[in-house]
């Protein structure tokens, strides 16, 4: 799905100034940054500035190829989240993972991932991640997201969750243009409640700085918010 999606990704999920503003507010103004699950790299490019201080990492070759085409001056790694353990200790002042990427990781792998993440962050370094609000969605068996349309290109993007359980769900996607289907796919996701995310991070040595519903900073409401954005700081 993701390689097939690379050429259309920015049409469906364009860069949002509000997202950039939130990240700029919380990420350190100096030091190296890492975008985990960077996709086509548009946030990495915007946050890295002329010095290219933001690196991107993504496990999909098509996404990384597209990112390198758009900004060849940036450093992009063909790497999944599990690969963070191979990076040097205390390399990054900030790491961010947005767009509901973290739930691609199996629940059993999260504690080890957080330990490796803490190791690559500098003391006091910032870790930001965004997911959908699973507190609310875990009450459903199936869930259909609003359709996203790009009228100029005639694109229609549909997403749904099926067979939702406390530890697993199927993420179905379908992208079509005026000529018909471009791709349809399904991948496994592994949801966690906000309470579980908090406990995992606190056990791994992270301090909660902020937990909000969206990039505008609206208060998080477990029963009604669509999204969940966490800002953490690595304890010294």
Image: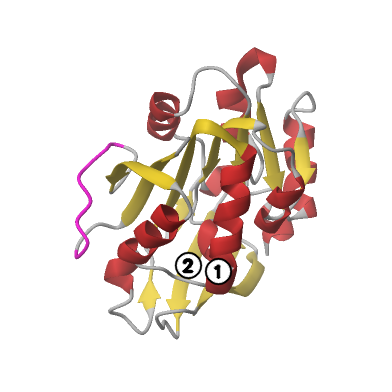
Q: Mark 2 points at which residue?
A: 159
161 lies left or right of 45: left
Could you tell me what secondary structure mostly forms the magenta stretch? Answer: loop
Question: Can the viewer see residue 189 in this picture?
Answer: no
Give residue 216's position: percent from left, percent from top.
29, 36
What is the quadrant of residue 56 in the picture? Answer: top right
130 lies left or right of 30: left
Alpha carbon distance from label 2 to label 1: 5 Å
The answer to whether residue 214 is above or below residue 90 is: below
Q: Is residue 222 magenta?
A: yes
Q: Give the range drawn in magenta.
A: 216-223
The answer to whether marks 2 and 1 mark residues whose Cβ atoms lie closer than 8 Å is yes
Q: Residue at x 73, y 53 (%)?
A: 83
Depth check, front residue: 174 or 73: 73
Q: Is residue 80 magenta?
A: no
Helix, strand or loop status at disc 2: strand
Q: Residue at x 60, y 57 (%)?
A: 113
């Amino acid at each position: 799905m993701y390689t097939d999606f690379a050429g259309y990704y920015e049409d469906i999920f364009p860069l949002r100034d509000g997202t950039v503003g939130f990240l700029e507010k919380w990420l350190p103004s100096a030091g190296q940054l890492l975008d985990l699950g960077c996709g086509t790299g548009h946030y990495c490019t915007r946050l890295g500035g002329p010095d290219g201080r933001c690196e991107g990492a993504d496990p999909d070759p098509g996404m990384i190829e597209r990112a390198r085409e758009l900004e060849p001056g940036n450093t992009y790694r063909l790497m999944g989240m599990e690969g963070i353990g191979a990076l040097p200790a205390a390399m990054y002042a900030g790491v961010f993972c947005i767009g509901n990427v973290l739930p691609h990781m199996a629940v059993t792998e999260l504690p080890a991932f957080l330990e490796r993440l803490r190791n690559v962050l500098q003391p006091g370094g910032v870790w930001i991640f965004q997911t959908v609000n699973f507190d609310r969605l875990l009450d459903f068996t199936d869930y259909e997201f609003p359709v996203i349309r790009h009228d100029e290109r005639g694109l229609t993007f549909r997403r749904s969750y099926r067979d939702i359980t406390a530890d697993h769900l199927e993420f179905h996607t379908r992208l079509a243009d005026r000529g018909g289907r471009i791709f349809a796919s399904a991948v496994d996701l592994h949801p966690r409640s906000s309470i579980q995310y908090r406990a995992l991070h606190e056990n791994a040595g992270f301090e909660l700085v902020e937990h909000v519903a969206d990039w505008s900073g609206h208060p998080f409401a477990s029963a009604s918010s669509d999204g969940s954005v966490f800002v953490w700081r690595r304890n010294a």
